[in-house]
Amino acid sequence: MGILGRIMAGAAVLALAAGGTFVWGWYSHKGAEPPLHRIMTRIDAKLFPETSAAQLTERLTRRIESTFLRLEGEVWEIPDNDFINGGGMTTWGAQLLVMNHAGLIHLFEDGKGLTRTAITPPDNGLAAYLVAAASEKYRDYTHRPDKMRFNDIVFVDADDLHGLALSYTFYDAARECYGTRIAFLDLPRDAAPATVTVGAGDWRVVFDTYPCLALNPDYIAMNAIQAGGRILFQAPSTLYLGSGDYGLDGIYTYDGGLQSDDNAYGKVMAVDLRTGASRIVSKGHRNITGLAFDPQGRLWAVEHAERGGDELNLIVEGENYGWPKQSLGTLYSGQPLPTEGTYGRHDLYRPPVFAWLPSAGISALTAIRGIDPSWDGSLLAGSLSSEDFGQSLWHIRLEGDRVLFAERIRLKRRIRHLVQHGEQIAVWLDTNELVLLTAMRRPDPLGATLAWVAKEFDPVLAGQVTATLQACAQCHSFEQNVQMAGPSLNGVVGRGIGGAPFEGYGAALAAMDGVWDTTSLTAYLTNPAGFAPGTTMPDPGLAGQDALIDGVIRALVQTDSSAAPDLRYD
């Protein structure tokens, strides 16, 4: 047994000593022992009784700022799910379906949350694999059954196809091998997710990756964390599959033939849902975690690299994207990968259109349509990784065949999957929550104030006040509680001096008593450094301009949206 095997075996012994079971404990949905996520939730509740994980997520996602839009989140917990990751989401007409790693499918209903459907997934062979893992033949192998999961779900609606497609890792007990399988469920057109009842045997197997892989004695027996498995439908009958390499890349174990055309791993596959016929679209991929069509109908994919160098690829029929011959990633030690060509380059095969260095842990991809002109036509990716580099949305603007920008929108949560759901964006977090994000344009309190100025003052003074307030807006927000280089000016009149939730106050302002009123504001605008020694605010040059200072203060009185719920930011 190798080093990794001994480590995993040691972990198994510890788990057994603690009263759990290493392989079955991960799937104890109905057993006496609660799943790991529930245990951790109970510990968290003991340590932080006033703050649940969902409450923390709600705080983080309530209002999210991006360059062009503000995103407002609504959080729903996923019931009967544990801490193991995997699964996918899809829209069924106006309905949203959420499938977890075990293939349990939930229906989201607005105002009600997620409820379990009666759609039973097909048998993926997990029970048979657990028996094999405990057998004398395989018990010394390194087993990770928690990573054997359902990878994606897609609703299909075409001329003669109507139903659900699933991608999942399967174990074939008769042949003692595994791979990725696509199964399809034919549904009548009048079926509804809340009322349909489906058995495990109602699905038909459409496609299995080839060859069926033997359990590996030298590494992880079935490294299903690298199964990929994202799927995407294109009418009239094609299902695209991002087929992962299962870790058989020749680096830590043997090369499973990823560059071979007789092998369906490390590929984008096109599968006909009617006939099961398949073809290789592209090869040289490691672990594809997202597929999407842009408005021009081009296919894009995101994938994990080894360490760093996560990729966004424009998928072109017949192209080779290099893995495991070339990559912008490195070994996890930071040393070069044993690849071809120059270290840190990707010039022998088709390079990615964009790469994330350091790795963001890209986990999902969708195309945006009908949200807002500032976002429509863009791609949106989710990421895992650490809070430093991932745990974010990535708004990707395409211009032809290149990326114009990749805007990072931090969530401080690991994003497992995302999909556009009507005019909202559904985001599934590893903290076991579904967040529905609504995009909206920001309110414009400054615009409303400037309109008031134009009506109240004579044209000359109005122009001066407008210019002054616009200069203030270079460093100060006019939205409530939105802090920039300086504190928000929304509601400043009557607020305590140094009283905004702003971390950049100088010592004098922070320690000063009193409130901002006509007297204090006049003194500050006339001579900031004299009023508060050490302040970082530059002199606005208003000394001696009493009428202008009075006009600015009167305008600031109008800039207070605390009584307008639709403009509040708290």
Image (cartoon, rainbow, N blue to C red):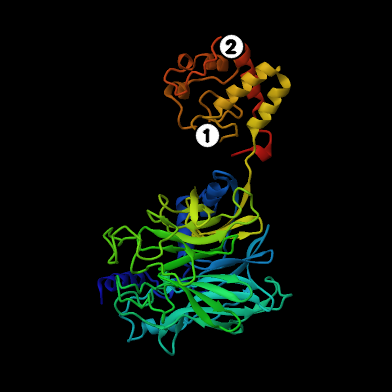
Query: Can you give x and y, in whole percent of width and height, for residue 470 in the image?
Result: 58, 27
Give the residue type that dot 1 points to.
Answer: Gln
Q: Which mark is residue 279?
A: none
Give the residue type that dot 2 points to.
Answer: Gln
Residue 85 visible in rendering:
no
For residue 553, side relative to residue 152 (left or right): right
Front residue of 30 and 564: 564
Please state which of the two labelled residues, at mark 2 or mark 1, is closer to the viewer: 2
Query: Can you give x and y, in whole percent of width and height, for residue 271 in the image?
Result: 54, 78
Image quadrant containing the N terminus: bottom left
Front residue of 49 and 570: 570
User: Which of pointers 2 and 1 lies earlier in the amino acid sequence?
Assistant: 1
At 59% from the left and 45% from the top, the residue drawn is: 69
Front residue of 41 and 510: 510
Q: Which residue is mark 2?
A: 545
Within 10 Å of the Cα at label 2, are there few (<14), some (14-19), or many (20+) other Cα atoms? few
Within 10 Å of the Cα at label 1, are there few (<14), some (14-19), or many (20+) other Cα atoms? some
Image quadrant containing the C terminus: top right
Res. 543 image quadrant: top right
Res. 3 image quadrant: bottom left
Task: List the single residue furthest toward the top.
Answer: 544
Q: Which residue is mark 1?
A: 483
Query: Can you give x and y, in whole percent of width and height, for residue 132 in the image?
Result: 39, 84
For residue 485, side relative to residue 343 (left or right): right
